[in-house]
Image (cartoon, grey):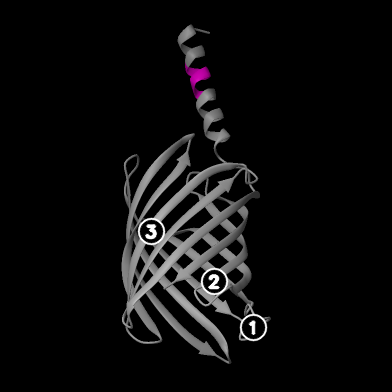
Amino acid sequence: MSKLKIFIIIGVLLTVFVSCAYAYDNHDFQVWNTNAQEYKPNKFSKITVEEEFRWGNNASDFYYQHYDAGYAYILNKHFNFGGGFRYINEKKSGKFREESEPYFLFLAYWKLAGINFSDRTRIEYRYYDYQVNSWRFRNKLDIKSPWTFTRFKIQPFIADEVFFRFNGIDLNENRLYTGLAFALTKNLSLELSYLWRTTKNTTTCTWSDTNALSFKTKLSF
């Protein structure tokens, strides 16, 4: 075997090894932390700032962060719409990569038999400096119990969010949440949940899943 072929084989093996080293195992346990600040300058407007951090590889490796600023117009108690911008820095193949994500969203709220429902539709344009840009559609349905418990108004909830890529209209991710919402103070709330995330590998068309402990705080003004 020629030296050139040996070098090619070694290069391929090293590339595979590095890629695998930063692709977490199926059923990986992760921790996600989200912190949001919400401000209502008047009864028709809502401004939200959010940051999120994620740890993978059994919560030992910091691999993701995003910063988000959004605005929503409060049409009435049932409908809001607006948009925003998200900056993402995520580790891929051992290197943090940047993504810019302007988006539009529409929110609906209603009650049925005392149960609280909310539905969020979000359309994103995903701009990268390392791969082809793309569009994505997301829809999240939240269902909250009509009952609250203790002085912290603990409220059980479940939620599900689906993700579609526009190129090919391909379902490539789903997130299922179940947890508890707390009203710690008049202005500070907490959501603690278990998150089961399934994602599709577009190359092999196979699915893998992640189990995450998610906790989100929101400070309202």
Q: Which residue is mark 1?
A: 148
Picture residue at 58% right of the left edge, 73% below the top: 184
* Outermost right residue: 150
Relative image position of residue 199 (x, y in whole percent): 54, 53
Give the amino acid at mark 3. Asp
* Outermost bottom residue: 113
Give the amino acid at mark 1. Thr
The disc placed on residue 68 is 3
The residue tagged with tag 1: helix, strand or loop?
Answer: loop
Residue 157 forms part of the magenta stretch: no
The disc placed on residue 48 is none
The residue tagged with tag 3: helix, strand or loop?
Answer: strand
Q: How many labels were placed on the picture?
A: 3
Q: Which residue is mark 2?
A: 189
Magenta range is: 8-12
Q: Quadrant of the C terminus?
A: bottom left
Q: Nearer the viewer, residue 205 or 145?
A: 145
Picture residue at 61% right of the left edge, 50% below the top: 30
Give me the C-alpha separation between circle 1 and circle 2: 14 Å
Relative image position of residue 87 (x, y in whole percent): 36, 52
Give the amino acid at mark 2. Ser
Picture residue at 36% right of the left edge, 79% below the top: 80
Horizontally, residue 123 falls left or right of residue 110, namely left
The residue tagged with tag 2: helix, strand or loop?
Answer: strand
